[in-house]
Amino acid sequence: MKKIILLFLITCQAWAQTNEPSALFIRYFSSPNQQLMLKHDTLWVYWYEAANKQNPKEFRDTSAVDLRQIADVKIIKGRNMDGKKGIGIQIYPKMNPVEKRSSQTIEIDAQKLSQTNTASVTQKLQGQAAGVTIGNDNSPGGGTMVRIRGIGSINANSPLYVVDGVPLQGNINSINPNDIASVEVLKDPSQTALYGVRGANGVILINTNKGQEQKWDLTQSTVLPLTLWSWGTTSVEMQKTRAEKRIVSWLKGK
């Protein structure tokens, strides 16, 4: 009888551990392309996308979020490129308000960019901004490497590109250089903090001719969230158990 009770208690304990919000978070938001890991109140997210016809080079990136510095957490819904429904969690980090534009801001107008006769946006930045290194990433096909703060980590050293106020998803050189009205390079941590962990390696703001009315307000208190998605049957299972609400409550309570 004692063995049965002991076995029951062990089973209950194991079930409780696998149903803790932290375990549910890892279970429902980890996928082959998005791996989550928790280490000492820090969330590590590892992204990977294999090369395909649309993106000839594989993509790898890493983000880290201090779970004790979360300002807000929101739930969003959407569909991926395959039409599958999904649930997303947006994590907004806390930030220190920026009172004024720092001297670390480098502005490059269309006239300066036109002085360089090249076919790519990144090559037009060559020699235009102090502290910005342009080179070759040594990959097949000779992709361009841009570094604002040098080599900061093994996988993720590229800056965040924001085009007309929207974070760029894809290759920066897909933009026609002739469509660019101005470029701003943000190097100061007090400025890049506005963009959360994604701006850890610096931020390049690109204003196109179509978006000339867009004005950058570096004093606004908005930041770009870290967005994690759960798709298909995994998201359906999560919604049935309402696990996403438990996860959000857990993240907000950290």
Image (cartoon, rainbow, N blue to C red):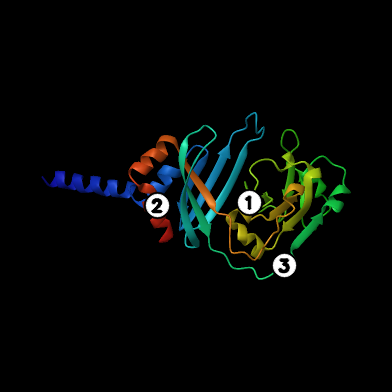
Q: Residues within 10 Å of mark 3 (few under 14, many from 20)?
A: some
- Where residue 69 sits: x, y (%)? 50, 62
User: Looking at the image, which residue sits at the far top?
Assistant: 53
Secondary structure of the residue carrying numbered label 3 = loop
**Which mark is in front, 1 or 2?**
2
Task: Decide if residue 119 is on the left or right side of residue 232.
Answer: right
Residue name at image x 52 percent, y 57 percent: 92
Q: Earlier in the sequence, mark 1 or mark 2?
A: 1
Front residue (pair 127, 113): 113
Can you say whether 82 is above or below 115 in the image? above
Q: Is residue 159 visible?
A: no
Circle on res. 153: 1
Residue name at image x 71 percent, y 43 percent: 172
In the rendered structure, which amino acid carries the disc numbered 1? Ser
**Which mark is in front, 3 or 1?**
3
Can you say whether 55 is above or below 62 in the image? above
Determine the CA span between mark 1 and mark 2.
29 Å
Circle on res. 247: 2
Residue name at image x 62 percent, y 32 percent: 51
Secondary structure of the residue carrying numbered label 2 = helix
In the rendered structure, which amino acid carries the disc numbered 3? Ser
In the rendered structure, which amino acid carries the disc numbered 2? Ile
Front residue (pair 1, 129): 129
Quadrant for the N terminus, please. Answer: top left
- Where residue 125 sits: x, y (%)? 80, 50
Q: Earlier in the sequence, mark 2 or mark 3?
A: 3
* Residues tagged 3 and 1 counted as in contact (Cβ below 8 A): no
Front residue (pair 137, 128): 128
Can you say whether 154 is above or below 69 in the image? above
Q: Which residue is mark 3?
A: 102
Quadrant for the C terminus, please. Answer: bottom left
